[in-house]
Image (cartoon, rainbow, N blue to C red):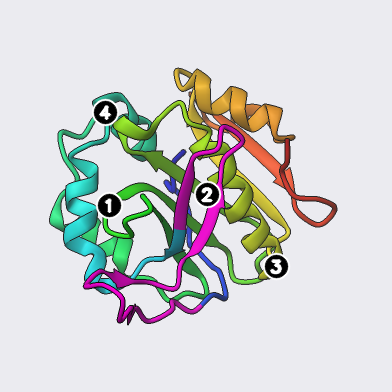
Amino acid sequence: MSDQTAKPTLSIKPDKPEADSSHDLIVSKSIPLTTRSGFEFHVRPVASADKEALAEFFKHVSRDDLRFRFLSPIPEVGDEMLSYLVDVDHDHKEDFLAFDIDDKTIIASAMIGANEDKSVAEVAIVVHADYKHRGLSWTFLEYVASEARRSGIKKLQSIESRENHAAIELEREMGFTAKSYPGDATLMLLEFDLSSATPTG
């Protein structure tokens, strides 16, 4: 799921972390979600302080998933891209982060971005290799789509490599329509009309 052409948007302000007096862990005001398999994780918008944690996260993304995410065979996610991912305006560019329940370990990232009038937004999701096959992508995309709809976005788009069969199948099952990406036969364009519904199982 790539943000190759995205110019992101979501009207969501990141919550400031607060200390829980019962222990030393810093607990963020993140949203708890549970997959259909019972796996629990937390979601919140990215903050500038997440750059180092994102760098660590991408070290645990498979080479194929990096290629599918950025639609290019890259050996690693460099400093310039990391800066782009955390440099959001929480209006026309947002990167949602999924955390393990420790609220420290990033296990997935979902970049979303829209054009000026929010008629369309592109979404791009990537998941930590150790957290795949737990229903995370489905539940995470449902949440991101609901937030996109709440913010006024009318249509979600996802640009996928034709080789990314798992993502294409998941999005189709959630109600996305699929067609060849204009001008590039190696890609697929998947779309969902948020004006009438949100993706769901």
Q: Which residue is labeled 3 in the image?
A: 150
Element assignment for label 4: loop
Outermost residue toward the right? Answer: 196
Q: Is residue 69 left or right of residue 122?
A: left
The amino acid sitting under disc 4 is Ser
| C-beta proximity under 8 Å, tags 1 and 3 | no
64 above or below 116? above
The location of residue 15, given as percent across then percent down, is 43, 79
Tell which tag, 2 or 3, sits nearer the viewer.
Answer: 3
> Residue 38 is drawn in which quadrant?
top right
Element assignment for label 2: strand
Q: Which mark is residue 62?
A: 4
| 18 and 175: which is toward the camera | 18
Tell which tag, 4 or 2, sits nearer the viewer.
Answer: 4
Q: Is residue 105 magenta?
A: no
The amino acid sitting under disc 1 is Thr
Q: Which residue is labeled 1 in the image?
A: 105
In percent of the image, x 42 and y 46: which residue is there? 4
| 66 and 12: which is toward the camera | 12
172 above or below 69? above
Q: Which mark is residue 81?
A: none
The location of residue 47, given as percent across then percent down, is 32, 71
Q: Which stretch appears magenta?
A: 13-42
Q: Which residue is labeled 2 in the image?
A: 123
Q: Is residue 67 left or right of residue 36?
A: left
